[in-house]
Image: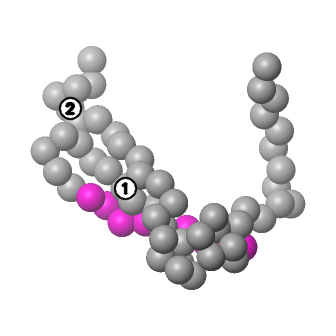
Amino acid sequence: MIIFERKDDAVPVCPHCKRPIEKIWYRELKGDLGKRCLYFCPSCRASLGVSHRKGLTFGW
């Protein structure tokens, strides 16, 4: 079992530059298969992840 615990006083660290992440930059990526966002570190600009929201065609 995995337990989720809210931790508001902890500051995450960028896995690339090891600096504290207090802000995350993002950029929208537009395409035919829906809306995507690329999240990246403002210090080193390394990619932290990509989210994907399906478009109207796939929203069953």
- The quadrant of the rendering that contains the N terminus is top right
Q: What residue type is labelled 1?
A: Cys
**Number of other residues with Cα within 10 Å of mark 1, as a class: few under 14, some 14 to 19, many 20 or more:** some
Q: Considering the numbered disc 1 on the image, is that residue within a helix, a strand or a loop?
A: strand
Vertical placement of residue 7 versus 14, above or below: above
- Determine the residue positioned at 23% across, 36% down: 55
* Distance (Cα) linking label 2 and label 1: 17 Å
List x then y, in percent, for residue 3: 81, 29
The residue that label 1 is drawn on is: 37
**Number of other residues with Cα within 10 Å of mark 2, as a class: few under 14, some 14 to 19, many 20 or more:** few
List x then y, in percent, for residue 56: 20, 32
- The quadrant of the rendering that contains the C terminus is top left
Mark drawn on residue 7: none
Q: Is residue 45 left or right of residue 15?
A: left
The residue that label 2 is drawn on is: 56
> Looking at the image, which residue sits at the far bottom?
43
> Looking at the image, which residue sits at the far left?
32
